[in-house]
Amino acid sequence: MLGVFSRNDRVRYPWLARLREGVVKTRLQLSGLFGGGKIDPEFFENLENALLESDAGVDATQFLLERLRTRALRVESAEQLKAELREILVELLAPLEQPLRIAGAKPYIIMIAGVNGAGKTTSIGKLARYFKSLGFTVLLAAGDTFRAAAREQLSAWGAKNGVPVVAQAGGDPGAVVFDAVAAARARGIDVVLADTAGRLPTQLHLMEEAKKIKRVIAKAEPGAPHQTWLVLDANTGQNALSQVRAFDDALGLTGIVLTKLDGTAKGGVVCAIALAQSKVALAQSGGARAQSKDPHQRPIPLCFLGVGEEIDDLRPFAAREFVSALLD
């Protein structure tokens, strides 16, 4: 049955354990700061270093420190200040958490983009598993026709999940996706996940190809794609923000999938993404214009987090869960 699903739709505790392991580097740094001791300039200097090393970026680090310094005036211990940081982080990240509604369209088409190596095709396989676990029927469209390995990888994920894959060797990506939409409509499929070729934002010819695929999807199914998601590698740090801007300019993103929070990444980039999106929201509302030097188009939610290579290592983003993984 089509409907709304969010963080309450999954088994929580095994996932939380994996998420905690995924951001272990940052958690260990932060937990060492709040074990006790004075709340003094040295404490804030150490906290600043820890946040920067976590890939939070300069802007998000300063944002967090300014608010924490204000709240430090009303607490007496580092443990109490940790609780204040928790609430600041939840407030910052909460707007990224938006339940996904799959309703009103069948097939519901999700276009997936990203740079080479970000984990795009693997994430599609895991998304197929997730949607199928919720009772949706799924079809995969192998729109990355430039790499035989991508088609083979997607076909393997299709077999692992027991879902059909529409692919052709060396064909036109738009034609493959068009055929996939037609096949999904004929078979009564609920969700189509459309892969696209990995590309760098500077590869303008490939970005144009992605725009073409989006136009083809719209011709095949009016009103589609219903979602356009960017897959980001959590290890790219602040470069993730430039990727979001470039792909949003080209495709009009509706969501982000952050992958490879597998113990090697630090997790702080989520704070940088959240702050950038909050500035967009401020610019849209007409408030704090002086603080919104880079108003883009609209806030873009963080739809899913990936923490490893297992098929179930991808789940919807939940702000309070993520903050707990960072601090507890």
Image: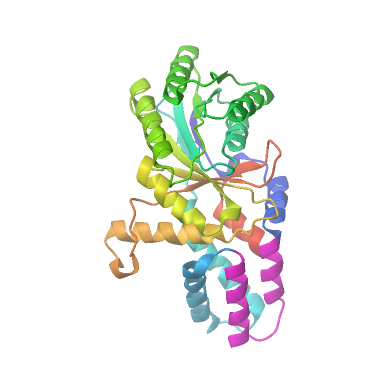
Let me know if residue 200 is in the magenta part: no
Q: Is residue 35 above or below residue 259?
A: below
Q: Is residue 283 above or below residue 205?
A: below
The residue positioned 69% from the left and 45% from the top of the image is 308
Residue extending farthest to the top is: 186
Q: Which residues are magenta?
A: 25-54
Which image quarter is the C terminus in? Answer: bottom right
**Is 220 on the left or on the right of 8, as rendered?**
left
Judging depth in this view, the residue of 168 and 195 nearest the camera is 168
Query: In this view of the protein, can residue 34 be seen by the observer?
Result: no
Query: In this view of the protein, can residue 256 be seen by the observer?
Result: yes
Judging depth in this view, the residue of 322 and 8 nearest the camera is 322
Could you tell me residue 144's position as x and y percent? 52, 29
Could you tell me residue 196's position as x and y percent? 49, 32
- Please tell me how many numbered marks the rendered image carries: 0
The residue positioned 53% from the left and 18% from the top of the image is 168
The residue positioned 48% from the left and 62% from the top of the image is 92
**Is 210 on the left or on the right of 117, as rendered?**
left
Could you tell me residue 198's position as x and y percent? 52, 38
Residue 178, by quadrant, is top left
Residue 280, by quadrant, is bottom left
Residue 157, by quadrant, is top right
Let me know if residue 48 is in the magenta part: yes
Could you tell me residue 57's position as x and y percent? 52, 66
Q: Main secondary structure of the magenta part?
A: helix
The residue positioned 39% from the left and 26% from the top of the image is 217
Coloring basis for residues: rainbow
